Image (cartoon, rainbow, N blue to C red):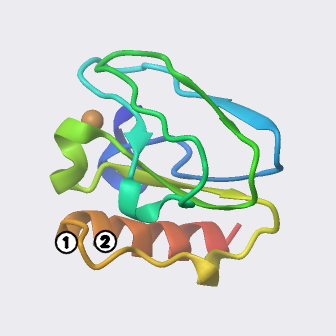
Amino acid sequence: MVNRNALGAMSYEPSYLNIQPGDTVKFIRTAPGHNAAAIVSMWPADAKQYRGNINEEIEMTFDKAGIYGIECTPHMAMGMVMVIQVGKKDLPAIQAPKSLPSRAKQRIQTIKTHYSQQ
Ligand SMILES: [Cu+2]
């Protein structure tokens, strides 16, 4: 959770992870005032949802393949979101729900472009 990176202000570094079922991700606080929580509308319906408190270095374990959106609750409207893809890397499959704030949708598009080039 950082205040700025290559993708812009208020970001996760990295903003995209491709991991395998059973992997655990720990969110590290490098700047204060952020959290990491499930974007409910961008989360597999039957997967465990997590909601970290502000400044909490939460660990999330992903047992099911799928696409998981993570939000910083206070900065979601500023576009502070990231995507974890469990299973095969498939950036075109990532779709931002229409209900997300516009800057969050823009960030997800930026993530898809940025991480397709890696
Ligand atoms: Cu934040």
The reply to whether callout 2 and callout 1 are in contact (CB within 8 Å) is yes
When the figure is inspected, residue 92 is found, relative to residue 60, above or below; the finding is below
Q: Secondary structure at mark 2?
A: helix
Amino acid carrying label 1: it is Ser
Q: Secondary structure at mark 1?
A: helix
Q: Of 101 and 116, which appears nearest the observer?
A: 101
Name the residue furthest bottom. Answer: 92
Q: Quadrant of ligand 1?
A: top left
Query: How far across and how far down the image is residue 96, in percent?
Result: 40, 74
- Mark 2 to mark 1: distance in Å? 5 Å
Q: Residue at x 25, y 67 (%)?
A: 100
Query: How far across and how far down the image is residue 63, in percent?
Result: 76, 44
Query: How far across and how far down the image is residue 99, in percent?
Result: 23, 72
Q: Is mark 2 within 8 Å of ligand 1?
A: no
Q: Quadrant of residue 25?
A: top right
Q: Is mark 1 within 8 Å of ligand 1?
A: no
Position of the N terminus, as image quadrant, is top left
Give the residue pinned by disc 1: 102
In the image, 43: left or right of 7? right
Q: Residue at x 48, y 17 (%)?
A: 57
Give the residue pinned by disc 2: 105
Query: How far across and how far down the image is residue 53, in percent?
Result: 32, 20
Q: Quadrant of residue 59?
A: top right
Q: Residue at x 50, y 41 (%)?
A: 49
Amino acid carrying label 2: it is Lys
Position of the C terminus, as image quadrant, is bottom right
When the figure is inspected, residue 73 is found, relative to residue 29, above or below; the finding is below
